[in-house]
Amino acid sequence: MKKILLICILLFEINTLLLAQISIPYYNNFETDTIGWYSDTSYGDSFHWDSTNYVGCSGSRGLGVGIDTSGTYTALYSPLFDFTNVSYASLCLTHKYDATLYQDGVRIDYSYNNSFWVILGGPSQGTNWYNAPTIMATGLPAWSGTSTNCINSSIALYNSSGSSIIQFRFMPVSMASNIDEYFLDDFRICISPCACDSIVSIEELEPESDYAIYPNPAVNSFTIESKNFGNSEFSIYNSTGQQVFKGELSKAKTIPSNYFIPGIYFVKILDSRKCTVKKVVITSH
């Protein structure tokens, strides 16, 4: 068992040699590889390819770290991503954190073309994006406190769209003597108009969900139907990511097609549990 763990750690750390530029969209659940990801080990603590049984995680493996020394930090670096021809993008995570509330925590930074690092987003942006406006260890926003199990967080990458090479880094920081932990289960960069945890790209939308759209293709009108009880809200985006319609949904909503020019549209539906995207085709009226 120790030999297997050692091999996994070695495979993870040699990824520093594998920094080819990766195109968007991107998805890694870390079940089979960590190619392109590497950890800063200068302070003794580093991320490792670990197993997990946390509720809410997508599988059995991910990248985890435990920081048990006061005043230290580590960093997890992503591969280099090529955003040159990307007009819209969002970052979606499944992760877990355990840190002293408002004292320690973890944040994400990004860098253009290997230049200076800038914190990504703030507490008022995205979904579940930082729960602490500042922490004592850094004076910056962070995920702090304890998420009992894996949660989903997402944010639109407005400043990244149309840029060239971008890299991300995860920064867990501790100023306490107790053990702080962070676990990254899924990492996705999406090119759909939905900044949420359930989308990899617009080509990979799952046909089965809690919502249905019919008829599809649509000529005169189409209906968005919920298979669940409760209210939700929806937005409709064209193929360039521009929002063209929005509304509320309880059980079913019929929308006239003459609101739209013929083409492909994406319906983003947000309820209390998750975000779902469905594709609808509008044909000539």
Image: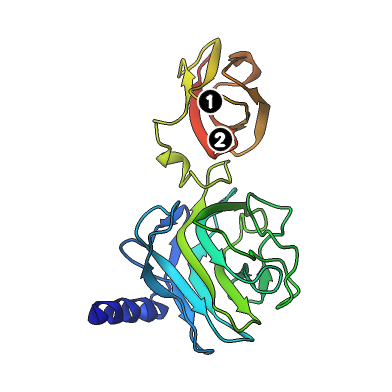
Give the residue displayed 52% in from the left and 89% down from the top. Answer: 42
Front residue of 104/184: it is 104
Measured from the top left, where is residue 137 in percent x and y? 70, 78
Q: Disc 1 marks which residue? A: 263
Measured from the top left, where is residue 115 in percent x and y? 63, 76
Q: Quadrant of the C terminus?
A: top right
Which mark, residue 122?
Answer: none
Which mark, residue 239?
Answer: 2
- Would residue 259 appear left or right of 192 to someone viewing this image? right
Label 2 to label 1, Cα distance in Å? Answer: 8 Å
Is residue 181 visible in this depiction of the protein? yes
Measured from the top left, where is residue 2 in percent x and y? 26, 81
Is residue 285 visible in this depiction of the protein? no
Q: Secondary structure at mark 1?
A: strand
- Would residue 58 appear left or right of 73 to someone viewing this image? left
- Would residue 63 appear left or right of 190 to someone viewing this image? left
Give the residue displayed 70% in from the left and 74% down from the top. Answer: 103
Front residue of 193/282: it is 193
Please rate how many residues cluster around mark 1, counting C-alpha atoms within 10 Å: few if below 14, some from 14 to 19, many from 20.
few
Q: Quadrant of the N terminus?
A: bottom left
Please, is residue 118 above or below residue 193 in the view? below
Give the residue displayed 55% in from the left and 10% down from the top. Answer: 220
- The amino acid type of the residue labelled 2 equals Ser
Are the residues tagged 2 and 1 within 8 Å (C-beta)? yes
Q: Secondary structure at mark 2?
A: loop
Q: Residue 54 sits in which quadrant?
A: bottom left
